Image (cartoon, rainbow, N blue to C red):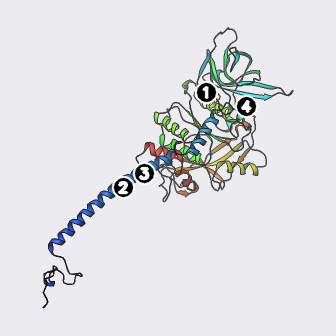
Amino acid sequence: MFTHLESPLLADSDCPDVKLKPPCLPPMMRKYYQVLLTAFAIVSACLFLFYKHEYDRLRHVMEVMETFGVHEELDENKGGQRFMKEVDGLRPANYHFEPTPAWTNIHKNSYVFSAFWDTTISVDGREIGKILAVAVDELSAPQELSCSIWVEGSSKKQEGSFASQMITDKTSPFLTRLDVADTFSVNNMAVYIYTCRVQAQESSPYAVSFYPKEKSYSNPVTIPVYSYRPANQHPDDIINVCLRSDSNPFNNVEQFLEFMVYYKAVQVDKFWVYSNGVSPKIDYLANIARASEVNVSLINVQYQPMLGALNKVVYFLDCIIRTRDTASFTLFTDLHNFVVPKFHNQLPRLFKDLMETAKSPPAFLVLKQLMFCKEFPDAKKIVLLPFKFLKKASYSSRQSVGEVVVVRPRMVWEGATVELVVADNAAAAHRYVPCGNPGEPTYEPAMFKFDKAVSSSLFLRRWKFLMWDRS
């Protein structure tokens, strides 16, 4: 009455596992499922590789945008702001001529390194202008010169009144205080300040000429004049660093990078780098710094062997005159010194608090120098990567303790001598050098509170992106 139909499913005895639910499929259908699963796995792997490739491309684009910013075509607001900032920088009121100093032979043994425009108010209220030139001349018989200035828009030079003053420990006591030189004469040569006084001009002169009195020079040598004056004549929180190197060309990229990244993180505004030439990589690093809003100028000092110790006097005078109207504090140092506040996060705030607590306005801030020996092991769990020198967290108490002096350039130039010794618990100067026999280390982690500011530096990120392999 009922017809028996055989099920396409296998009998339990033919299955490898009788407990499977639902009953297992025949071998042919199992092969079909395996083929489908294999095809699905292959398609999934292909899709994964495709989307992984697209993700990497997008990630690289985002890295570029994070490092260099959004192009103005992609971000109209930021593009407009950047354009207006560039336009503001080109306005006559904001643009300033920054000539590069160079040794210029005036006559016989008279040489001028750099020249600056300066204005003062006389007792009767008149504005008097003068050129200040850093020069070297014979110690026993300095040249008797004449001078004239060149002003924009005029084809004729304007005659001035020439005078000179020899730099000695008496005329410039701050040079002795700062251990700039232990002598002020070498090979019968001395450093001088040449002045060329003229009536105040509606616009600043762009060049000056010095020439012997006894000769008439129709085409005298012209020396470019640095005449920048900030809108704020007495900046309260502007810090400049004058970085000096030895007589060798400047080529220590890693230390230079660490130096600028750190000091930019603690709000230094301008770097003046005095060196006897730089390597191409240093020049490239300086260009990246400028593109990353780090204000740096390279000055080739053209080291003169016949001047010996006077070279340093020349560089220091140039630094003081160059920064006296543009900075409230100037640090003249080499690559190894780092001024590190213990509680403040910025140097301007530290210096402002020190000024407010001083009994009388100091011209010198004296900081204790701590020797962070390279022989000591690196600190653990730090973010100051990829730095090599700032990883030390211990200094040597055995090494002789020196000092680092920050000057107020305008006050120092005018002869102020008041000093303020900064307490050890407020700030210190960390010096990272080999010590030879360092002794027992003393732990000092003040530097590492800046690791976040350093690691997020736009300048550092751009340098890593352009120069180092991305992990």
> How far from the left and from the top, in percent, is residue 408?
70, 40
Q: What quarter of the picture does the N terminus occupy? A: bottom left
Q: In this view of the protein, which residue sits in the foreground, 166 or 188? A: 166
- Identify the secondary structure beneath mark 1: loop
Mark 2 or mark 1, earlier in chain: 2
Tag 4 residue: 170
Amino acid bearing label 3: Leu
Amino acid bearing label 1: Pro
Contact (CB < 8 A) between labels 3 and 1?
no
Q: Which mark is residue 52?
A: 2
Q: Residues within 10 Å of mark 1 (few under 14, many from 20)?
A: some
> How far from the left and from the top, in percent, is residue 164?
72, 22
> How far from the left and from the top, in percent, is residue 219?
63, 11
Tag 3 residue: 58
Give the image quarter of residue 424. bottom right
Is 303 placed above or below 330 here? above
Q: Which mark is residue 328?
A: none
- Identify the secondary structure beneath mark 2: helix
Q: In this view of the protein, which residue sits in the foreground, 303 or 151? A: 151
Q: In this view of the protein, which residue sits in the foreground, 436 or 407? A: 407
Mark 3 or mark 1, earlier in chain: 3
Tag 1 residue: 99
Mark 4 or mark 2, earlier in chain: 2
Q: CA distance from mark 2 to mark 3?
A: 10 Å
- Identify the secondary structure beneath mark 4: loop
Q: In this view of the protein, which residue sits in the foreground, 248 or 169? A: 248
Mark 3 or mark 4, earlier in chain: 3
Query: Is residue 243 visible in the rendered structure shown here?
Result: yes
Amino acid bearing label 4: Lys
Work out which residue is located at the far front of the displayed protein and give it.
1
Q: CA distance from mark 3 to mark 1?
A: 44 Å
